[in-house]
Amino acid sequence: MYTKRKDDVWRGPALSEVERAPPARRYSIISPLIGGTLHPVRWAVIAALGIPCALAIGFLLTRLAGQDDAGRSLLRILRYVLALEILLLVALAFTGWLYERRECERDLKLYRPPGKLLDIGGYRLHLSCTGSDGPTVVLEYGHQASHLTWYLVQPQIASFTRVCFYDRAGYGWSDPSPQPRVPSVMAEELHTLLDSAGEKPPYILVAHSFGSFNAVMFAHKFPEEVSGLVLVDGLHTLSLFPFRLSERLSLRTMQLMIPFGLPRWRGWCGGEAPGAIRGEKQAITCRASLFRAFYRERAAYP
């Protein structure tokens, strides 16, 4: 999660696998259904599509050759195969839905928001603050990350000053927002959240990657409330790449599959994480609403 120099000085959060990957591979990591390895699932999908296609081609060829009896037989087999596959798909979808529902209920019993949920105008955002004295440090994470990015850093900062982390709308424990996912709106949401929680400026904003846009915008809109700005691998607008069709399909595919349990079962959501936070990370990432938030943020890049 974090990188260190030889003298063991902390250098900030290491990039996740998604953020390290070049754009061409980035979304094949997020959704193996599009560009990764599915093992038995991939071959099951290939078979489910390939067998009906082969039968349909065989039916057309026999009809063109004037073999009507053979054609009718192939058509009858094709209908049986399609009916069987539809029934199997419905059964698997229902089983997956039950599995995902049970696991979500289990997550809610095992994990709770470490902070509090505050209403900022019809929807709630999650904020957690610890420590005291000094200016309040506010931690912001990157695109497709979570507050767990800073889970090793926050306790260290809390030992000498007050520090807060929060979940952007749609992320972690926060509700989705009806507002556009652009830095001007997200900076306003953060300001309202801090004010609702009774946190007092000045703030030191520490932002990683995509979060630097929100931090810079916050400092621009509320300069009298910001005493410091720290950007860790911060981005600039020229570094934003186009929202490709493969990325759109990948995020939408994950969003649609999560309610049926396949991403959780295959370990596609949650990713690798230390044992101390593995369960909580899966609990806050195996959610369709999260991938909808990813999509909305990504679509707002232009």
Image (cartoon, rainbow, N blue to C red):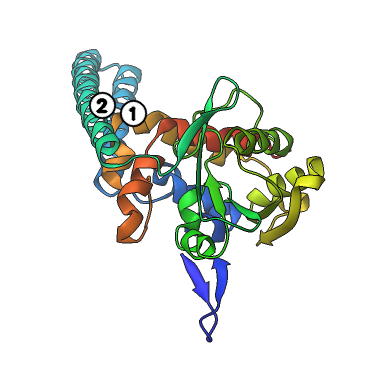
Q: Amino acid at mark 2?
A: Trp
How far is the residue under mark 1 from the one under mark 2? 6 Å
Q: Tag 2's secondary structure?
A: helix
Tell me: residue 237, above or below residue 89: below
Residue ID at (78%, 42%): 222
Residue 90, position as x, y percentages in the image: 23, 21
Tell me: residue 81, above or below residue 264: above
Q: Which of the two residues, 81 or 60, is positioned nearer the viewer here? A: 81
Residue ID at (76%, 44%): 217
Q: Within the image, what quadrant is residue 179 found in?
A: top right
Q: Residue furthest front?
A: 133
> For the residue carrying disc 1, how many other residues have a C-alpha within 10 Å: few (<14), some (14-19), or many (20+)?
many
Q: In the drawing, what numbered circle is on residue 259?
A: 1
Q: In the drawing, what numbered circle is on residue 203?
A: none
> For the residue carrying disc 2, how many other residues have a C-alpha within 10 Å: few (<14), some (14-19), or many (20+)?
some
Tell me: residue 82, above or below residue 188: above
Residue 49, position as x, y percentages in the image: 32, 31
Instruction: Name the residue carrying label 2.
Output: 97
Q: Is residue 74 left or right of residue 172?
A: left
Q: Which of the two residues, 257 or 112, is positioned nearer the viewer here? A: 112
Q: Which of the two residues, 44 or 282, is positioned nearer the viewer here? A: 282
Q: Is residue 241 visible?
A: no
Q: Within the image, what quadrant is residue 31 found in?
A: top left
Mark 1 touching mark 2, by CB under 8 A? Answer: yes
Residue 78, position as x, y percentages in the image: 24, 20
Q: Amino acid at mark 1?
A: Pro
Q: Tag 1's secondary structure?
A: helix
Q: Is residue 95 left or right of residue 11?
A: left
Residue ID at (68%, 58%): 234
Which circle's residue, 1 or 2, is located before the other in the chain?
Answer: 2
